Amino acid sequence: MDRVLPNEWLLQVKALRTKFYTFEGELDAVNGVDLEIRRNESVGLVGETGCGKSVTALSIMKLIQDPPGKIVSGSVLFKGEDLMTKGTDEMRAIRGADIAMIFQKPMSSLNPTFRIGTQMADVISLHQQLGKKEAWDRAIDLLRSVRISLPENVVKQYPHELSGGMRQRVMIAIALSSNPDLLIADEPTTALDATIQKQILTLIGDLRREFGFSMLFISHDLRTVYNICDRVYVMYAGNIVEFGDIESVFDHPGHPYFHALMNSLPKFALKNDSLAAIPGTIPSLLNPPPGCRFHPRCALALERCQREIPLLREVKQDHWVACFRAM
Amino acid sequence: MSDFIQVQSLKKHFPLGGGLFSKASAEVIAVEEVSFSINRGETMGLVGESGCGKTTIGRLLTRVIKADSGKAFFEGRDILSMGEVEFRDIQKDIQMVFQDPQASLNPKMTIKASIKEPFVVHHMYDKVGVDDEIMRLIRAVGLNPEHLNRYPRELSGGQQQRVGICKAIALNPKFLILDEPTSSLDVCVQAQILNTLKAIQEEMELTYLFISHDLSVIHHMSDRIAVMYLGQLVEMAPSDELFDSMLHPYTQALFSAVPTFCNEARRFDITLRGDVPNPVNPPKGCRFHPRCFRRAKMCETEPPPLREVGKGHFVKCHALE
């Protein structure tokens, strides 16, 4: 049963809409998102603060707090089953076991008052029928698999005794404890220093080869995503504006937004006096611009961009762009 | 060559523990024996990982905290040894922009009141034309007059940082210390802020000390770069020289940790082992030796000196002999 074709879709998100009801009005944080992940694939989700990356991930996990948020429509097919029809208990069994998640701040995901081993054993015995001693031993094994030296000592330590990189390793170990099919990593290295970030990314790459899980990697760091993902989705103001094969999207950005975003990065190769900044700011989702949500800041905007919403079109094999100007 | 800023053997240790009646039990070695100079109109980049002491240097130079020893000459006068009154005069010329723009603005003050504050503090507000000056300043940093009556929470992160820059340049300073000014911002906002900083530097003939952990930003902004590790300078060179021929193993590792795009050549592929050591008890000899991939026996006992290996290129490493 586990032998499946490599191109089988593990996760298919279709027309997902998540709204938040605030005092100022309702806003579409995720405005009809389609996203697909194959088995053994690493998929990046990039965009700026507030574009809806994290809300997309939380919606997939059905972890949107209601109120103020609500998944209003769409489906999330995981191994062919729609998670949107699952009840609370069923979702609880899926989370952690089949879909695991790691977050930006490992400190706030760990309980400061319990030993590392206790917290890990709790999760392990929740999803697998293991005794106390066995769960504790499994925790040590897992810490070893995330390359923590002297795991026998680390299990007895408290989170504050570990460095940021170590804590993130512990979180990864917990996430992998029940051998999930999908790992959702929400900015897992943003809070870490450059050399530690490199260690963690190398580790995640090694573990993917070892454990063979798929990954949804959420980040605002374009360089990191380019280096560890096979495909990428670009979000802007709640919409997917471009997606496809990583090389194709990064080498030939089709959407003016992603093109401008790439140009606004300082590059090592060419040192210019000024960077090509995108004028204006990201729109308020309470009152998004009509038509294409990027048109007020777009250098290539046409008259129709103000009225019509561009749909995603395949401009090249496995490279889709939501723009009227894209060829 | 007359140096605009000259820092000599700057040192700062923070006591750990210790209370009213007990002595401190240990010390965090934040900055040790750091010397560098900055020419007028130049941008000096200071790069390193968290806890390496780069922010402490910025705070020492503004006298927010007191140095243990060392000298810092600003236009030939040692700002660390002068009295409070004398320093108050120079303070106008040395300003700082912080990483978290929201935390550095008073939430209960309108933007206008915040920008006015430096004039009030330095008894310059009664002067005629200050309101016009404020108008000029906010345009220089890319804000509109309509922002003046708003509160910090009503502005985006990028706009808040523009207010922070506006406050820093209000009194026409000569030297600006920029402590991770774009680290909390998105890339396209970062690009806007970096452009603004370059524009006002040219217009007001400012000298910058640009502190960041982001090598691509440092490279974009700086004329010269100093790399710090555990409180010490390990390499210093003109920006292009450093990127073309970096010599210290730590600099190489730091550079190799930055993910690259395919059109950017990757010259090293180094993943360092272990974490940054605890600055309370830094390793003996070369502080980098436990993580170094080129360490020799002598690195464990003998701290290497900072030597000039090329014109203006300084490296603190034994492996280059």
Image (spheres, coloured by chain):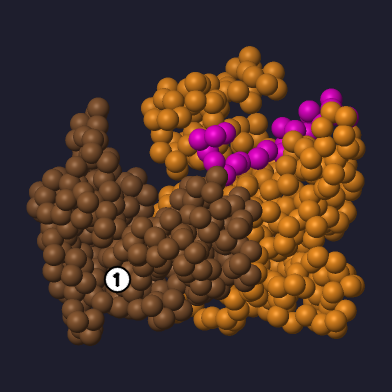
Chain colours: A brown, B orange
Amino acid on which disc 1 is placed: Asp
Q: Where, by quadrant of the figure, is residue B286 drawn?
A: bottom right
Q: In the image, A41: left or right of A106?
A: left
Asked whether B316 or A97 is in front, the reply is A97
Residue B321 horizontal side relative to residue A243, left or right: right
Total marks placed? 1
User: Which is nearer the eye, B124 or B97?
Assistant: B97
Q: Magenta segment range?
A: B83-104
Q: Which of the 4 image quadrants contains residue B301?
A: bottom right
The quarter of the picture where the C terminus of chain A appears is: bottom left
At a point 87% along the width and 53% down the height, the residue shown is B8
Measuring from the top left, give residue B199's x and y in whole percent.
Answer: 54, 49
Give residue A239's quadrant in the image: bottom left
- The vertical placement of A46 against B249, above or below, is above
Magenta run includes residue B92: yes
Residue A246: percent from left, percent from top: 32, 75
Instruction: Give the residue drawn at x 46%, y 67%.
Output: A134
Where residue A167 appears, as percent x and y from the top left, is 54, 58
Expressed as whole percent of the image width and height from the top left, the position of residue B255 reads: 60, 72
Secondary structure type for disc 1: loop
Does residue B281 appear in this view? yes
Q: Identify which residue, B32 or B18, lies in the foreground.
A: B18
For residue B307, say whether it is visible. no
Q: Chain of mark 1?
A: A
Q: In the image, is residue B265 part of the stretch drawn in magenta?
A: no
Query: What residue appears at the point 34 percent right and 61 percent down from the top-left corner?
Result: A127
- Write the residue at 57% across / 81% down: B269
Q: Which residue is mark 1?
A: A181
* Mark 1 crowd level (few <14, some 14–19, many ≥20, 10 Å Cα): many
Quadrant in which the N terminus of chain A is drawn: bottom left
